[in-house]
Amino acid sequence: MNARTPHRDAIRILFILNAGGVPLTDPDDATVAKIFKGEARLHAFDFWMRNPDYLASELLDAYETTSDIRYRQAAEAIFESDEPDLRRVPMIRYLFGAYERLDDALSLLRSRDLVRITGIKGKLKVHETDFILTVRGVDVCSTAVAQEPVLEWYARRSTLVAEVAGARGGGALKEKQYEQATYAQTQLGGIIPPIGPEVQRRLLQLKQAA
């Protein structure tokens, strides 16, 4: 299981924003590249990045829906690499699902102008928090992998998470994650427990039925 550090969180978040962001063109600012909409969506992506067994379950859902063998193979690879043990970074369940304060990580990204934070504000509260990835931020994702090949896991995994998430917003992704009984039944303020063994059993059943 991985220990959390602000720099490790920052790397993971940067790759998530790059993979899950959509192109952004601002005629008045050539330094912006992409926008990732919604803090709840960010936490949903982050949950699947940090809990490979839950991502594997989503991949099996996609396999059963589409019959695309890639999804089953991706789920199988997660367990073959012992990711549920080696890559897991626990998250706590709050009222609206998995959540972890990312202030330190985002501060690191903002201080280097890799990410800018914006959103939709009302008179009394912020209705949506959005994250703008700068051109520099996109470049860092590319150069980081070239300079440190070990970071390629973050690039590939964030791309896979983005594919599974599709165009769904944070609310829809949270609802999907709540379909997991273990997730939904976790006590508020408690660490969401792993589900690896049951996902492995399901994977075996699907392989035998194929």
Image: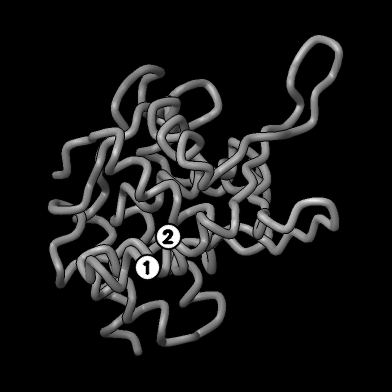
Q: Please say if 57 is above or below 131.
A: below
- State how the image is colored: one colour
> Which structural element holds mark 2?
helix
Residue type at numbered disc 2: Val
Query: Mark 1 belongs to which amino acid?
Result: Thr
Residue sticking out furthest to the top:
124
Q: Is residue 56 visible?
A: no
Nearer the observer, 56 or 28: 28
Q: Where residue 6 sits: x, y (%)?
A: 30, 33
Residue depicted at x 30% and y 69% = 152
Residue 121 horizontal side relative to residue 70, left or right? right
* Residue 142, position as x, y percentages in the image: 41, 69
The residue at 37%/42% (across/down) is 10
- For residue 90, the mark is none
The answer to whether residue 41 is above or below residue 86 is above
Along the line of sight, which residue is nearer the eye, 205 or 111?
111
Q: Residues within 10 Å of mark 1 (few under 14, many from 20)?
A: few
Provide the residue designation for mark 2.
140
Is residue 186 or residue 122 the one in the foreground? 122
Task: Give the side of residue 26 with respect to residue 141, left or right.
Answer: right
Whether residue 126 sits left or right of residue 122 in the image: it is left
Picture quadrant of residue 102: top left
Looking at the picture, how far across and down is residue 187, in whole percent?
36, 20
Label 2 crowd bin: few (<14), some (14–19), many (20+), radius 10 Å: some
Query: Which circle marks residue 143 in the picture?
Result: 1
Tag 2 and tag 1, C-beta contact below 8 Å: yes
